[in-house]
Amino acid sequence: MTPIKECLLNKSTKTNPIWLMRQAGRYLPEFREIRKSNPDFIKLCLNHTLAEEITLQPIKRFGFDAAIIFSDILMIPYGMGQTVEFKKNFGPNLGSLDLDKLQIVTEDNFIKKLSPVYKLLSNLNNSKDLENKDLIGFVGAPWTLLVYMINKVSPKKGLTEAFFKDEILINEILNFLDKFIKIHIENQIKAGATIIQIFDSWAGLIQNDFDKFLYSPTLSLVNHVKNLGVPVICFPRGISDYVKFSKIVKPSMINIDYDVDPKDLIKYLDIPIQGGLNPEALLSNKESLRKEIKRYLDIFKDHPYVFNLGHGILPDTRVDMVYELVNIVRNYK
Ligand code: 1CP
C-alpha cells in the first residue's frame, strides 16, 4: 500500500509521506526549459508526452510519495468552451461567457477536448517511476472556477459587488460546473488517478452564502469521488473554520493553509491532515526552514499527516531548499 493510503487509513507510517502543491512547474529549471519553447500554456497541458515528462520531473529529483498531473484547474472552463489564455506576468485571461453556447456543450464534446489529460493519466499509471506512489488527479472547486469564469482574470485584488449582480447567471454556471467537474473527476479516475484533490484556492473570498458557494457544491463532489471508490482531499484555502468545513463536507483528508493554527485543529479534527507550511519558509535560510518544518511535524506526531505546503510552491524557490526540505522531513524522528 502507498504511504499516503496508509496515512488515509489512520495507520502509523515510519515517516510522514510528502508531496508539494505545484511541485511540477515554475521553480524547476527543467520545466522552464520546456516552457520556453511552448508559449501556449493550454497546448502544453494538452501535449501528453511533454505533460508526462513535466509531471515526473519532481518525482525524479525528490522522490515524492505522489505525482500530481501537469494540468490546470482552468482546463474545465476550457473544456466548457470558454477561451483561456495565460499571459506572461499577468496570469489567466478568460474569454466572454456565452450561456447559449454553454448549453450546447455535450459530455462527448467535453471529454474529447480534454482527452489528452486522460491519456496522460493512463500513461503515468503504467510508469515505473510511480511504483508504490499515488497519482493525483485534480479539479478546481465550483466556487473558484465560478470566480475565474465570471471575473475573467485572477481575483487577486478581490471581487466587487458587480460580481454577484446576475444571480441567474451564477446559478446556471454552478449547475453546469457540478455536471462537468463530475465528468472530469470520473474520467480522471477511470484513466488511473488514485486520489482526487479539490482546489478551492479562492474560498477565502466567500463572505456570505457559505452553503450555496462552499459547503453544498463541495459536498456534492466529495460524495461523487467517494462513490467512485477513491479518496478525496479538499483544500478550501483561506476559510476561517476548517473544523466546520470538515464536519460538513467530510473529505478523506483536509489540506490546511498557513493561517490556521495546527495545534487548535488537532483538538477538534479526527480526519487525516495535509499541508500547512508557509511556502515562504522555502525562501528563507536552512535554519529557519528546519525550525518551521519541525514545528508542524512535532504537532502532528500522533495524528495522520501528509507533509505538504499551505499553498503552492513559489516560482522563486531554490531547488536546493526543496532538497533540504525533503531531507528534513524524511529524517525526522
Ligand atoms: O506561465 C507558466 O509557466 C504557467 C504557470 C502554471 C503552471 C505550472 C499555471 C498557470 N498552472 C500551472 C500548473 C498547475 N496548476 C498544476 C500542475 C502542477 C503542479 O501542481 O505540480 C496545478 C495543480 C495547478 C492548479 C491551479 N491552477 C490552481 C490551484 C492551486 C493554487 O495554486 O492555488 C490555481 C488557482 C490555478 C490557476 C492558475 N494557473 C496558472 C496560474 C498562474 C494560476 C493562478 C492565477 C492566479 O493567481 O489567480
Image: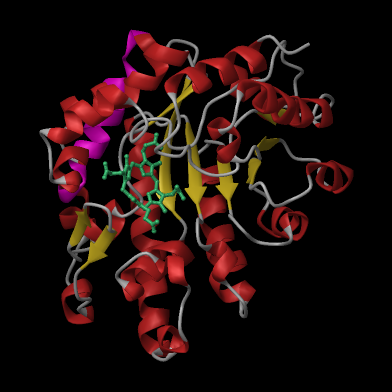
Q: Kindly report the secondary structure that dominates the magenta region of the rendered protein.
A: helix
Q: In the rendered structure, does residue 122 fall within the stretch colored magenta?
A: yes
91 with respect to 109 (left or right): right
Colouring scheme applied when the structure was drawn: secondary structure
Quadrant location of the N terminus? Answer: top right
Q: Is residue 259 visible?
A: yes
Residue 295 screen position, x and y as percent: 78, 30
Q: In the rendered structure, does residue 167 fall within the stretch colored magenta?
A: no
x 60%, y 43%: residue: 310
* Quarter of the view holding residue 144: bottom left
Q: Is residue 130 visible?
A: no
Residue 129 screen position, x and y as percent: 37, 10
* Total numbered labels placed on residues in the image: 0
Q: Is residue 197 above or below residue 291?
A: below
Quadrant location of the C terminus? Answer: top right
x 36%, y 51%: residue: 73
Residue 164 screen position, x and y as percent: 45, 86
**Extreme residue toward the bottom, this view:** 165
244 with respect to 104 (left or right): right
293 with respect to 186 (left or right): right
Residue 48 screen position, x and y as percent: 18, 31
Q: Which residues are magenta?
A: 113-128
